[in-house]
Amino acid sequence: MSNYRKCAVSNGYSLIFNSGWTKVNNSNALNAVNNSDTVMLAAGIEYAKGPDTLTALATSSDANYGQRNLLINVAGLSNVVDYHNFNLTYNRQVNPDLSFTGQVGLVGVTSQFSLGLPKTLLPTYSLSATWAITPKVGLTMNASRSVAPPTTIIANAETSYLATASLTYQATPKLSFATTGAISYSTAAFTPGGAGTVFTPYLTATNVYTATATMTYTMTPFISAALAAVFSERVYDHFITPQDVITLSLNYRPH
């Protein structure tokens, strides 16, 4: 759940405000220590002129990990982690068919809500490009380094390197196809006590390889159906965990 607002000031400048609440529940019993309730607040300023947009944004996300009370002294895990993000984003629309987005930032954590700067800040960055090769074929590529709440690692934060490529094909006005390939590498961050404990295998480097194929049929402007196949493989500490998922969904979007 989120609430995003942008207020135009003058001469291309706008103020940005965002807030949200996220609840995460993992079905895997071990990953339950990453179950969380997160409240997010963000504020920034945007400047847009012609094809260029520059945005500076500061975000504070307060995550409460309710399953960690007994694990704080064991693996250096905190039951409350506040994430501080400072990002500068630049977007350029080169022409109607090609656009680029680049972002650099810093991320730090504290064990409770604080308006002060964390003692340690880690760098983040991303670069993406979107290209409409033909009126029916599109290509999107992205590479990034992020520091965020943990998803595949048991830790206070997770550092991830991600590279993706997506190809889309609009066969007809109602029928479209998409395929995506992704490679990611993740490791623990801001968790000094985790090494040498039972959690060590889940704090070491994790590689995930994913391939996705999707077919979408738009029935009306508000209703669409999608058939998706996801093939993934997770590799960590000499273990390989494959996962294949096929889903059929019906989506309704009133706006």
Image (cartoon, helix red, strand yellow):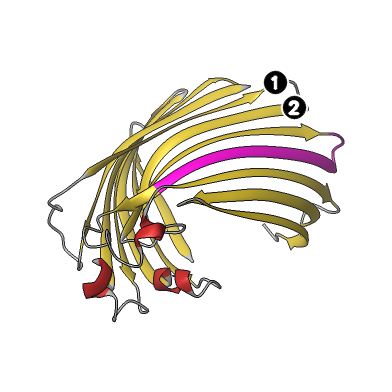
Disc number placed over residue 110 in the picture, else none: none
The residue depicted at 32 percent of the width and 55 percent of the height is 42
Q: Write down the region rendered in magenta.
A: 171-186
SS class of the residue under badge 1?
A: loop
| Residue 50 falls inside the magenta stretch | no
The residue depicted at 50 percent of the width and 75 percent of the height is 29
Instruction: Look at mark 2 in the image and give the residue it sits on.
Output: 137
- Across and down, in percent, residue 33 comes to 40, 72
Decide: marks 1, 2 in contact (CB < 8 A)? yes
Dot 1, how many residues are within 10 Å of its Cα: few (below 14), some (14-19), or many (20+)? few
| Residue 179 falls inside the magenta stretch | yes
Find residue 141 and report its image quarter: top right
> Which corner quadrant holds the C terminus?
bottom right
- Does residue 39 lie above or below 162 as drawn? below
Could one spot residue 129 in this view of the protein?
A: yes
Find residue 223 and report its image quarter: bottom right
Disc number placed over residue 133 in the picture, else none: 1
Q: Amino acid at mark 2?
A: Val
Could one spot residue 77 in this view of the protein?
A: no
- Across and down, in percent, residue 9 comes to 32, 42
Q: Amino acid at mark 1?
A: Ile
- Across and down, in percent, residue 194 comes to 27, 62
Dot 2, how many residues are within 10 Å of its Cα: few (below 14), some (14-19), or many (20+)? some
- Does residue 244 lie above or below 9 as drawn? below
Q: In terms of depth relative to the viewer, which is nearer, 168 or 237?
A: 237
